[in-house]
Image (spheres, rainbow, N blue to C red):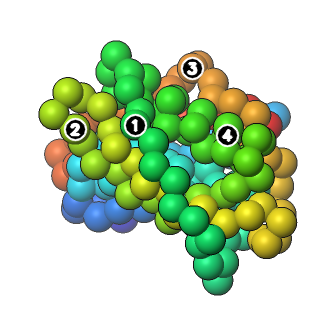
């Protein structure tokens, strides 16, 4: 994978999408990238979910829709991940698929294909929140990338 640097994050290759967990003391840090902001944020959700649950082969049982608003891209990322934390903690539902679309007013319309937490293998501590420390979202030459620390 190749790419440039954006605020200390290594941007990932040529307009493609992806994500990964990176070493971090005590909590979990994830990086995500995509050809546009919405795909990058959706990849961040997938990365966060993969830090605590194995969703491979799990079929969604429902689709939940959410309108995510914020004052900027960092706010949108934090609010989107907080929405996932809420669904896991309160509803016992985990996204196994994510689709995010921009609205004309800067918000996101998000579709979360969800499955019960009880139907998947738990592989780590469930997220408790999103840290604002060192949270980054931004464009780079081939798309967008983000990095965020998840409190567990």
**Mark sitting on residue 85:** 4
**Quick check: marks 3 and 2 in contact, CB under 8 Å?**
no
**Mark sitting on residue 67:** 1
- Observer-side mark, 2 or 4, equals 2
Spatial CA distance of label 4 from label 3 is 15 Å
Q: State the image coordinates of residue 5 (x, y, percent, origin top left).
A: 32, 39
Q: Is residue 98 above or below residue 119?
A: above
**Mark sitting on residue 132:** 3
What residue did someone put label 2 on?
Answer: 103
Spatial CA distance of label 4 from label 1 is 15 Å
- Badge count: 4
Spatial CA distance of label 1 from label 3 is 21 Å
- Observer-side mark, 4 or 3, equals 4
Q: Nearer the viewer, residue 49 or 69?
A: 69
| Mark sitting earlier along the chain (4/3) | 4
Residue at horizontal 79 percent and vertical 47 percent from the top = 126
Q: State the image coordinates of residue 34 (x, y, percent, origin top left).
A: 32, 54
Q: Residues within 10 Å of mark 2 (few under 14, many from 20)?
A: few
Q: State the image coordinates of residue 57 (x, y, percent, origin top left).
A: 64, 83
**Quick check: marks 1 and 2 in contact, CB under 8 Å?**
yes
Quadrant showing the C terminus: top right
| Mark sitting earlier along the chain (1/2) | 1
Q: Quadrant of residue 128?
A: top right
Badge 4 marks a residue whose secondary structure is: helix
Q: Residues within 10 Å of mark 1 (few under 14, many from 20)?
A: some
Residue at horizontal 67 percent and vertical 37 percent from the top = 86
């Amino acid at each position: 994978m190749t790419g440039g640097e954006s605020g200390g994050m290594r941007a990932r290759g040529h307009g493609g999408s992806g994500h990964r967990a990176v070493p971090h003391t005590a909590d979990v840090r994830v990086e995500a990238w995509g050809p546009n902001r919405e795909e990058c944020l959706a990849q961040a959700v997938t990365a966060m979910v993969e830090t605590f649950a194995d969703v491979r082969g799990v079929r969604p049982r429902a689709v939940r829709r959410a309108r995510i608003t914020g004052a900027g891209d960092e706010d949108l990322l934090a609010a989107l991940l907080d929405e996932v934390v809420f669904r896991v903690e309160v509803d016992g539902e985990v996204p196994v698929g994510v689709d995010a679309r921009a609205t004309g007013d800067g918000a996101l319309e998000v579709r979360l294909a969800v499955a019960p937490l009880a139907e998947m293998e738990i592989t780590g501590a469930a997220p408790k929140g999103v840290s604002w420390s060192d949270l980054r979202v931004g464009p780079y030459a081939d798309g967008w990338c983000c990095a965020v620390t998840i409190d567990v």
